[in-house]
Amino acid sequence: MRLPLSPHIRSRILDGTVDRGYRNGQRLSRSGPEDPDQTMVDIHCHLLPGMDDGPDSLDESLGMAEVAIADGITHLVATPHASDRFRFIPEVVQRRRDEIQSRIGDRMRLATGCDFHLSFENVEDARANPRKYTINQKQYLLVEFANFSLPPSLDDTLHQLQLLG
């Protein structure tokens, strides 16, 4: 289920006036201040090609973007994995985001982030590079937990990440 974010949170994640895309087959307005009734944000999508277990090609990525637009998504955060299996390279993420954005135009606004796996190495790198993994290099981090258990130090780890800003 996708829920609209509050105007306060949305404005802090994604900036600017954008095309609102489509909802229920009808074109949404394109100009003026953002209307919470016309904005839908997907903050977790493996859209970028060849980055992880998402699409293999640019064509697949563009097809996914078209489905999102048709579903009424107006803003999407591309979040490839950042894990021991998939290396997160912000420059590559940005280049692939830019390529998709140039192809879809202003029908949907793309941002970057990652699916941050909570590992010792990632946490240490996030401490050294606080904006590397965050959504649009701001202050929000999408964290993925292990499927089978939560580490006993989870509260402290998340608190330490939060203190980084």
Image (tube, grey):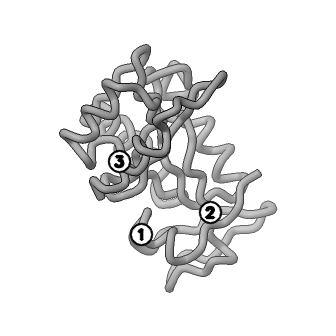
Disc 1 or disc 3, which is closer to the eye?
Answer: 3
Q: Secondary structure at mark 2?
A: loop
C-alpha gap between disc 2 and disc 1: 20 Å
What residue is at 30 percent from the left and 37 percent from the top? 95
C-alpha gap between disc 1 and disc 3: 18 Å
In percent of width and height, residue 51 lies at 43, 24
Residue 95 to residue 6: above or below? above
* Other residues around mark 3 within 10 Å, as few (<14) / some (14–19) / many (≥20): some
* Other residues around mark 2 within 10 Å, as few (<14) / some (14–19) / many (≥20): many
Q: Residue furthest bottom?
A: 32
Amino acid carrying mark 1 in the image = Arg
Nearest to the observer: residue 18 or residue 46: 46
Residue 113 to residue 137: above or below? above
The residue labelled by disc 1 is: 12
Nearest to the observer: residue 160 or residue 119: 160
Disc 2 or disc 1, which is closer to the eye?
Answer: 1
Tell me which label, 3 or 2, sits earlier in the chain. Answer: 2
What residue is at 39 percent from the left and 69 percent from the top? 15
Image quarter (top left, top right, bottom left or bottom right) of the C terminus: bottom left
Please report contact status of discs 2 and 1: CB closer than 8 Å, yes or no: no
Q: Secondary structure at mark 1?
A: helix
In percent of width and height, residue 34 lies at 54, 79
Left or right? Give the position of 53 relative to 113.
right
**Residue 161's disc number:** 3
Amino acid carrying mark 2 in the image = Gly
C-alpha gap between disc 3 and disc 2: 34 Å
What residue is at 21 percent from the left and 42 percent from the top? 129
**Residue 21's disc number:** 2
